Image (cartoon, coloured by chain):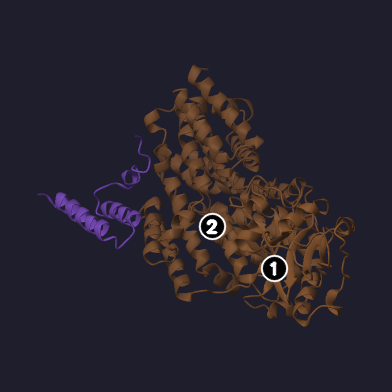
Amino acid sequence: MTMAIGLILAILLVALVFFVTELVRMDLVAVLVLSALALGGRMTPAEAFSGFPTPP
Amino acid sequence: MTMPQILIFAILTATMALFLWGRFRHDIVALLALMACVVAGLVPAAEAFVGFGHPAVITVACVLVLSQGLQKTGAVDWLARTVLPREAGRLTSMAALMGLGALLSGFMNNVGAMALLMPVAVQLSDRLELTPGQVLMPLAFGTILGGMTTLIGTPPNLIVSGFRAEAGLGHFAMFDFAPVGVAVALAGVAFVALIGWRLVPARKASGAEGFETASYMTEVRMPEKSKAIGLTLRQFEDEIDDSEAQVVGLVRNEVRMTAPHGGRRIREGDILVLKADVETLAKALAVFGIKLEEQDPSSEKEETTKAKTAKDKKTAKAKADEDPEEEDSKRDDEIVLRELAVLPGSSLVGRSASDLRLRTRYGLNLLAVSREGHPPKARLRTLKLKSGDLLLMQGPAEVMADFVNDTGCVPLGERALRIPDKRMAIIAGAIMLGAVGIVTAGLLPAAAAFTLGVIASMLLRTVPPRQVYTAIDWPVIVLLAALIPVAGAMQATGAADLLARFLVETIAQGNAITALVVIMVTTMFLSDVMNNAATAAVLCPIAIGIAAALGVNPDSFLMAVAIGASCAFLTPIGHQNNTLILGPGGFGFGDYWKLGLPLEVIVVAVSIPLLLIVWPL
């Protein structure tokens, strides 16, 4: 397992915990995940917002 | 000209015509343009919605949320209190107010800055012995000028930056706009504060004075055996419909009710407080065997009702020299009169008082409406409200505050500056400064930095998570997201280059400086009649095309578009801030250019030489 895979799995796990416990609103969790990935260098900022237009 | 070029020109012409016509809201027009491009095959269906992820669009949305934080926590009120001089002459006061408006709108959305400072401006006009409009128009223009000073100051700047990035030159930095923008804003503020405000027509319509002639309050006591007894208030109002009377209050058993429910039945001995035109009312009431009470009811009324009735009457008739003691005596449960300006995008727009069921739902009376300086011809109850209308409303202070929050109105004149929560205000300010700092230092692009700011606002509760989505002006977001691919199609089909070459060869004759002036003046003119972000989106590809045709630096031309797009001073429809002061200032369509035209000339005169120095061709 590379460092990148470990990082992504860790972020997803934390997100899952938040989604389940509902400690924080889910829209906020999702954006936090996005920022964590962008800051962790897993994504360019341009890619970070490419999810907003999602064609069917 | 190729077929795609002809198609995109046709679509753009139709789009601009629809923008100018103003029949449909700008976001609808923009979506129509986008779909026309998709159907015509100019924008691939898969890429039709990429505009929603465009950094400019994301940043605009985030800036709106952060602005909301600054407004709600009172950070702006604190700044206003610190900056604005308490006792100063016209020149200093006016310059300080416009300067503050410009500074704020450099970092928050222009409408937000305007709405916050409007009550201050109305109070100031009173102190300076000017009409409210003579201060409101300079303030509106100041906030628009301030938008051109930073990357986030106004959506056109972000659009311009986006087109630069797509052309492969990278985004503009946070303060790239400042050298020219600040100079132009300062020149504009100085001109308006020194000379310009005298050019604003002195319209008397705002304030209570504007309402004076419309109608006033009167009271009637229900005599024995009147035909009205047993009717509900709503039925009674329908019966006397011709006089346009409204039952705004009811006194029964010495208890006074404001804005009574329409379902209440009239009993013997009730005193109805009516707001109506007296002459027609007397005829209508004669049918019921009712006589009008004396105009001054205090002689025969019970102690409890006397004070308030007298006060209502006095304020409604509104002597220009309003009683200052009245302010002090206000309590939470007290009945107050408020003037409210309808913001563009308010939930009130397009609805009438009876649609809103003001009395049943809120217990508020709508006493009068002032539109462009006159009471409108239509009946008050069925009049569809428009943005920029000024409403005179009466009701309990607390309910009024809720109503203002729910519907997006700006209360004028009465609101004192205050800090609801000092700690929150500091946090909100720090978040905004932090985001600006990160972008300025080049650590993150604007979209990412301001998204972090939004997350911080949500986590630290300067903007409650519930309010995050309502803070965003969705029509503007949709407009931008829809027009970006359309403008892209103009570039992709080569239509922009075609138009650019045409402009260069005919009007500019190959002279770059003439071309620069042409592009700025064209942008200004379009921005005066249509949305400024839409203007920027359409003109950016042309600007880049002109620079390419002349073989010069595209930055000078992009900056010219940014400056021009922020110059909507000729009409009330060019910018939301101009629309907002229509009612409160008592202005009409033709009142704006008198100050706006000289101001636009000054902007061109100052900015062109500066552009050539800061962004050499």
User: Is B270 in front, or is A22?
Assistant: B270
Horizontal and vertical percent position of residue B140: 65, 56
Residue B258 marker: 1
Determine whether, in the image, residue B249 is placed left or right of residue A50.
right
Under mark 2, the amino acid is Gly
Horizontal and vertical percent position of residue A9: 17, 52
Mark 1 or 2: the one toward you: 1
User: Is B611 in front, or is B294?
Assistant: B294
Determine whether, in the image, residue B378 is placed left or right of residue B421.
right
Packing grade of label 2 (10 A; few <14, some 14-19, many >=20) is many
What is the display colour for chain A?
A: purple
Q: Please report, as a chain letter, where disc 1 is located.
A: B
Q: Is residue B291 above or below residue B179?
A: below
Q: Extreme top residue here?
A: B2
Label count reads: 2
Q: Is residue B480 above or below residue B273?
A: above
Q: Extreme bottom residue here?
A: B303
Residue drawn 70% across the image and 53% down it: B389
User: Is B507 in front, or is B577?
Assistant: B577
Residue B185 marker: none
What is the display colour for chain B?
A: brown
The residue that label 2 is drawn on is B106
| Mark 1–mark 2 distance (CA, rounded to whole Å) | 43 Å
Residue drawn 35% across the image and 45% down it: A49
Determine whether, in the image, residue B557 is placed left or right of residue B396.
left
Tell me the SS state at disc 1: strand
